[in-house]
């Protein structure tokens, strides 16, 4: 449903700080009001949009994330993860049980080879990565900045598993998004970091960072 709402541009047609009737919203999207109301009611149950008993629609903090003018918008993520390629990959989820990769089984090719053959989905992918709140380019210090010896950028935060095929995961995590900050405090033991799986260590918080250990 998030993909449908994003494709129709619903979030941009709902006033940022006001209301619009379902009839007017449906007309602006060139769809019928009855099915539009049903979809919005489902999303409203997840606190994505607010639908009143009088048939008016307003934004919530979550639905505003689908506006294209919102910083780090999730509009493009909703479009990509609900697109035909990802949708078809769900039909091959069974191969993951034996170590396979669902999207490769569905597409008979790699992710980027598939995108090269499907320019519309490739554009949605590029737009999603450009507006990603965890843009990896923001995690790296400019080359002209001198950092204390032993300090490390918060590369762990870049590995948060934002590739969930459910866009609801984006909306729930977005409630707690904060600014990614660089660690400027030198570690007690220069260039000493804890080993193990970066995916397991970095998934819980955007504040994740590489930490020193006492034995290195």
Image: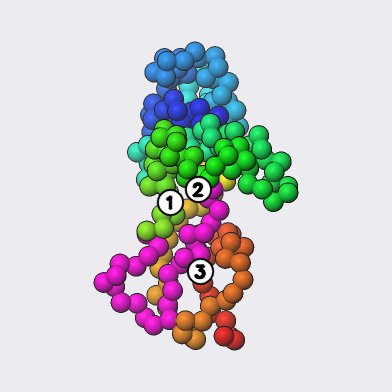
What residue sits right under mark 2 in the picture?
174
SS assignment at label 3: loop
Residue depth check, mark 2 versus mark 3: number of the one nearer the observer:
3
Disc on res. 206: none
Q: Quadrant of the C terminus?
A: bottom right
Q: At 39% across and 75% down in the image, what residue appears?
A: 184
- Which residues fall within the magenta stretch? 138-163
- Name the one closer to the observer, 74 or 19: 74
- Crowdedness of circle 2 by 10 Å Cα count: few (<14), some, many (20+)? some
What residue is rendered at 48% in x and 28% in y? Answer: 5
Could you tell me which secondary element the residue under label 1 belongs to? loop
Q: Quick check: 199 above or below 102?
A: below
10 Å neighbourhood of mark 3: few (<14), some, or many (≥20)?
many
The answer to whether residue 98 is above or below residue 184 is above
**Residue with the most extreme left position:** 144
Q: Which comes before the other along the chain, label 3 or label 1?
A: 1
Which residue position holds label 1?
A: 133
- Drawn side of residue 53 relative to residue 127, left or right: right
- Percent of width and height locating residue 82: 53, 34
For mark 3, what is the residue?
209
Whichever of labels 2 and 3 marks the residue nearer the N terminus, that label is 2
Magenta span: predominant SS is loop
Q: Is residue 46 above or below residue 136?
A: above
Instruction: Decide whether residue 153 is among the magenta residues.
Output: yes
């Amino acid at each position: 449903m998030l993909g449908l709402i994003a494709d129709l541009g619903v979030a941009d047609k709902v006033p940022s700080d006001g209301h619009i009737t379902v009839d007017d919203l449906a007309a602006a999207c060139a769809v019928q009001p009855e099915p539009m109301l049903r979809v919005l009611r489902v999303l409203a149950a997840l606190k994505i949009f607010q639908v009143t008993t009088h048939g008016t629609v307003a934004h919530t903090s979550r639905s505003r994330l689908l506006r294209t003018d919102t910083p780090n918008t999730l509009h493009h993520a909703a479009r990509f993860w609900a697109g035909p390629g990802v949708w078809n990959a769900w039909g091959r989820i069974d191969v993951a049980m034996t170590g396979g990769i669902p999207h490769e089984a569905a597409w008979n090719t790699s992710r980027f080879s598939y995108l090269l053959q499907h320019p519309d989905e490739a554009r949605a992918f590029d737009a999603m990565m450009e507006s990603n709140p965890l843009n990896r380019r923001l995690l790296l210090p400019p080359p002209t900045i001198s950092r204390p010896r032993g300090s490390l950028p918060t590369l762990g935060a870049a590995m948060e598993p934002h590739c969930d095929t459910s866009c609801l995961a984006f909306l729930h995590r977005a409630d707690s998004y904060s600014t990614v900050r660089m660690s400027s405090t030198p570690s007690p033991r220069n260039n000493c970091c804890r080993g193990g799986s970066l995916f397991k260590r970095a998934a819980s918080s955007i504040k994740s960072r590489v930490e020193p250990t006492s034995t290195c």
